[in-house]
Amino acid sequence: MVAARPAAAPGRALAAAGRGDDDRRLLDQAATFAGTVGGGGVELAEVEAARVVVEVTAGDVGPATVRHQRLLAGDGWRRLPVEHRAAYLLDVARGWAEAGDLPQAGRALLDAERTAPSEVQDRPVAREVLTAVARYGTAPLGLDRLAAALHIT
C-alpha cells in the first residue's frame, strides 16, 4: 500500500468533515506520516491547519482555538506559502463565525488580510464573514478599514 502525501490526507479529512463524517482518523494518519516521513515542519503545519478547520467546523471551538494558537506560533506555519496561510485563516474565520465566535472570526479575517490581501479581496468567503462580523457590536479594531476596502457597509 502506498502512503498518501501529507497534504492529501488532510484534504480527505476535510472532505469527510464537510460531509458530516467527522473522520479525524485520517488526520491522525497524516500527522504520523508528516512526522516520520516528511520530518514535520510544513507538512505537519498543513495537518494541524486541517485539524483546526475540522474542529471548528464540528463546533469544537475551545480545542480549535488552542490548536490554532500553537499552529501560528510554530516554525512550520511561517514556512507555509502566504496564500495557504491566508486561505486557512479564511476557512477558520468562516468556521468561527458559524460557531458564533464573531470576535475570533474577525481577528482571523484581519490576520488573513495582513498575510495575503489579494486572497481576502478575491475570495467571496471573506465578504461573507466580514458581513457577519461587522453586524457584531464590538468588531475587532481595523475591521472597518477592511470593510471599506471591500465596499461592505
Image (cartoon, rainbow, N blue to C red):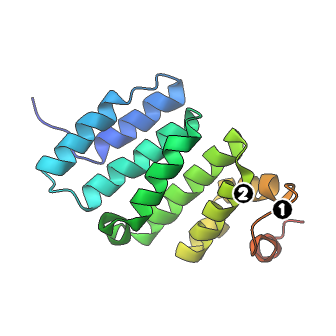
Q: Position of residue 142 (x, y in %)?
A: 75, 75
Q: Name the kind of residue labelled 2 in the image.
A: Pro
Q: Position of residue 62 (x, y in %)?
A: 55, 42
What residue is pinned by disc 1?
A: 138
- The answer to which of 53 and 8 lies nearer the viewer is 53
Q: Is residue 16 left or right of residue 136?
A: left
Q: Quadrant of the N terminus?
A: top left
Q: Is residue 57 left or right of residue 49?
A: right
- Residue 2's image quarter? top left
Label 1 packing within 10 angstroms: few (<14), some (14-19), many (20+): few
Q: Position of residue 55 (x, y in %)?
A: 50, 38
Residue 102 is marked as none
Q: Name the kind of residue labelled 1 in the image.
A: Thr
Q: How many discs appear?
A: 2
Q: Is residue 16 left or right of residue 43?
A: right
- The answer to which of 137 and 18 lies nearer the viewer is 137
Q: Position of residue 70 (x, y in %)?
A: 41, 58
SS of the residue under disc 2: helix
Mark 2 and mark 1 lie on one chain; the one further toward the N terminus is 2
Residue 103 is marked as 2
Q: Are the residues tagged 2 and 1 within 8 Å (C-beta)?
A: yes
Residue placed at 48% from the left, 51% from the top?
A: 66
Q: Is residue 29 left or right of residue 21?
A: left
For residue 12, above or below residue 115: above
